[in-house]
Image (cartoon, rainbow, N blue to C red):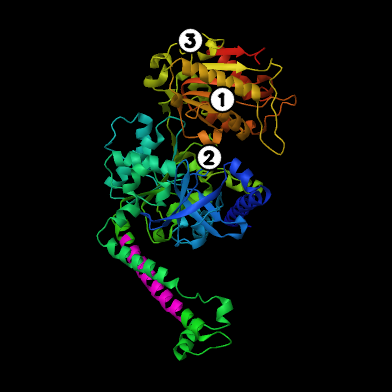
């Protein structure tokens, strides 16, 4: 099995695992249980809302009871009435309120969803897997992608040439400038951007410089949020940018820069709308006639039905009036198909015209696999969030490009892969493979603009060879410098606004032990949850805004407990969900506390790196360091806080 066959196999394994997990959960759990978990919404009534700016058919599903769900804008959902596994109707969530969820459908909504008793489930999306497989095949066989193939297989040593540059952003630091200059002169270049080092800002400069050089640039990222961050930064620098992808997945404030919005606001798009409106009218008329289902056809083809209808005779036991009605249905359906095909052709022409004039096209990796992108070519792919993208996902935009500038941080969390077998192949990203294979094609950004120096130093030493430098603007940043004053409480030491580092060690507390819910693979720790709550209340009483506080924990069940205890404005999530974000104050609950010294996936130290580096002014660590110290890095972390911050032993707290 060659390299690319292994990638294809891994993609197929991951697809099957995601599909299996989605279907298995729907089979295993009642609708009510899935709703409690936030992955389904029941007892909805559908109302047709018309077509949105993407040309999709929008149905609003609402009910009087408030909707509390993890289903979010951009998610693919399965729509059903009765048994969800007997439905094949899926759509994309375009908006949500406390009592409704609106879903975009590719085709006109069937009548049954415009009634009561509708259920929607968070579901599996196969589209990206198909796009990954297609991209793998192109990398393996296409002549245009030979340069990718050679680099991936280690057969070509990329040459780095530093280009003299007149910088548009004159405030870039020397490390950022060097990265820009090298990226502009290289076929393949990697920017290693540790937390807070201005990776996105550096990429924006590279993109604008490439356009100055007459290059056409594809800009991609694994997530919509990362794509939108770059889009917004480029817009603020007055760049002309087109954002591709489903409009439901783009921030509303950026909507006018989407391909859908631009296309539909052109004068000649009115003809497309007219054609579709005519088709919609005919669809309503078609409903007055009998659809030629097998029970009525009895083996007759469309042509036979049309011919027999003219004779006004019965055939094969089918009454003449039924044959005539089916013939009318077929005639109208043919007109509908003609109108929709004409509308589609005209829309494709408009899309191609807009894209051909676009020097910068921004989207997720997957969106570059959309049908209308197939024949587009770019001089350069600028790929952000590269260490969050699996290798096949990175290929989707890369096969449209002639060179690559990619940025990420392989010292943070890898892509999420559900299949255990696929994880062995897909967890190592293209970025990580290239940075290991070719030492000369990367540059690390060293000056960070996020963390107080004391917070920064530990991850710098453990993960970045001590290379990180705190910028003067953040070096001495504390809550006190932000005007926050101390209040008296039993945890005054931990809350101290002058001190950026605090650690609450529960190892001497008899209530410290972790727990596991029946039927769950996750973990929870009630003592740590109570401590988090008290620390959060302490910061709020000091005058800190709730939005400035973040709570991180590795385990879903602990997140669940904490969300019930903390104000809604406090961002509380797993490490994985917090990657890429930052807060003035970060409180970490490590959860694990057991006699065996088992740490589970806390052993993946990239999780620790991500957690620590979210904090700007204050980091509070809560955990049983008897258990955690079975790993030497956690032991070193406690010693570091002893020497550079405050350690509080939580001995008798209940």
Q: Residues within 10 Å of mark 3 (few under 14, many from 20)?
A: some
> Residue 151 lies in magenta, yes or no?
no
Q: Which residue is mark 2?
A: 68
Q: Earlier in the sequence, mark 2 or mark 3?
A: 2
Q: CA distance from mark 2 to mark 1?
A: 26 Å
Q: Quadrant of the N terminus?
A: bottom right
Q: Earlier in the sequence, mark 2 or mark 1?
A: 2
**SS type, badge 1:** strand
Q: Which residue is painted at 46% across and 10% down in the image? A: 486
Q: Which residue is mark 1?
A: 588
Camera-side residue of 27 and 282: 282
**SS type, badge 2:** loop
Q: Is residue 575 visible?
A: yes
Q: Nearer the viewer, mark 2 or mark 1?
A: 2
Q: Is residue 221 left or right of residue 88?
A: left
**SS type, badge 3:** loop
Q: What's drawn in magenta, residue-wise?
A: 327-350
Camera-side residue of 417 and 412: 417
Q: Nearer the viewer, mark 1 or mark 3?
A: 3
Q: Position of residue 476 (x, y in %)?
A: 42, 16
In the image, which disc is placed on residue 603? none
In the image, which disc is placed on residue 487? 3
């Amino acid at each position: 099995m060659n390299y690319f066959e292994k990638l294809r196999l891994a993609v197929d394994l991951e697809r099957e695992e995601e599909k299996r997990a989605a279907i298995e959960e729907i089979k295993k759990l009642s609708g009510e249980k899935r709703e409690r978990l936030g992955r389904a919404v029941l007892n909805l009534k559908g109302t047709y809302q018309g077509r949105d700016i993407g040309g999709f058919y929008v149905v609003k599903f609402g009910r009087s009871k408030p909707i509390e769900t993890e289903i979010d804008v951009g998610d693919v959902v399965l729509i059903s009435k009765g048994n969800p596994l007997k439905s094949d109707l899926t759509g994309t969530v375009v908006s949500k309120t406390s009592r409704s969820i609106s879903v975009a459908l590719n085709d006109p909504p069937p009548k049954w969803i415009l009634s009561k008793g509708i259920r929607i489930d968070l579901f599996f999306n196969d589209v990206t897997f198909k796009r990954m497989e297609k991209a793998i095949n192109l990398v393996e066989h296409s002549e245009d992608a030979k340069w990718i193939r050679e680099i991936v297989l280690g057969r070509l040593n990329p040459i780095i040439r530093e280009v003299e540059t007149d910088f548009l952003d004159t405030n870039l630091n020397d490390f950022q400038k060097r990265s820009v200059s090298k990226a502009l002169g290289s076929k393949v270049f990697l920017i290693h951007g540790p937390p807070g080092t201005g990776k996105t800002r550096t990429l924006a400069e590279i993109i604008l410089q490439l356009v100055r050089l007459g290059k056409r640039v594809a800009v991609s990222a694994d997530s919509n949020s990362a794509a939108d961050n770059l889009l917004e930064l480029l817009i603020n620098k007055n760049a002309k940018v087109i954002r591709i992808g489903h409009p439901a997945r783009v921030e509303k404030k950026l909507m006018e820069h989407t391909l859908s919005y631009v296309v539909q606001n052109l004068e000649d798009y009115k003809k497309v709308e007219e054609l579709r409106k005519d088709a919609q009218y005919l669809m309503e008329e078609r409903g007055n006639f009998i659809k030629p289902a097998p029970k009525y056809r009895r083996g007759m083809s469309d042509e036979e039905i049309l011919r027999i209808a003219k004779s006004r005779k019965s055939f094969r036991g089918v009454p003449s009036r039924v044959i005539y009605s089916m013939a009318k249905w077929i005639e109208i359906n043919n007109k509908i198909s003609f109108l929709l095909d004409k509308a589609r052709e005209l829309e494709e022409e408009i899309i191609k015209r807009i894209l051909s004039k676009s020097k910068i096209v921004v989207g997720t990796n997957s969106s570059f696999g959309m049908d209308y992108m197939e024949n587009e070519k770019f001089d350069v792919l600028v790929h952000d969030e590269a260490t969050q993208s699996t290798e096949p996902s990175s290929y989707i935009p890369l096969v449209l490009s002639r060179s690559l500038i990619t940025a990420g941080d392989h010292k943070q969390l890898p892509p999420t892969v559900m299949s255990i077998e696929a994880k062995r192949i897909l967890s190592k990203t293209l970025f990580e493979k290239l940075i290991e294979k070719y030492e000369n094609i990367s540059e690390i950004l060293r000056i960070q603009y996020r963390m107080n120096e004391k917070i920064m130093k530990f991850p710098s030493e453990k993960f970045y060879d001590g290379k990180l430098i705190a910028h003067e603007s953040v070096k001495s940043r504390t809550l006190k410098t932000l005007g926050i004053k101390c209040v008296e409480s039993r945890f005054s030491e931990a809350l101290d606004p002058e001190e950026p580092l605090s650690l609450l060690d529960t190892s001497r507390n008899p209530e410290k032990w972790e727990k596991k819910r029946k039927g769950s693979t996750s973990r929870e720790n009630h003592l740590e949850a109570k401590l988090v709550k008290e620390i959060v209340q302490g910061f709020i009483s000091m005058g800190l805004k709730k939005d400035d506080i973040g709570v991180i924990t590795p385990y879903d069940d602990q997140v669940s407990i904490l969300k019930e205890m903390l104000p809604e404005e406090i961002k509380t999530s797993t490490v994985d969900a917090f990657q890429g974000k930052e807060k003035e104050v970060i409180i970490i609950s490590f959860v694990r506390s057991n006699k065996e010294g088992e740490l589970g996936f806390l052993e993946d130290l990239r999780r620790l790196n991500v957690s620590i580096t979210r904090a700007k002014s204050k980091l509070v660590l809560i955990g049983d360091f008897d258990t955690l110290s079975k790993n030497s890095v956690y032991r070193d972390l406690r010693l570091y806080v002893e020497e550079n911050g405050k350690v509080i032993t939580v001995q008798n707290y209940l």
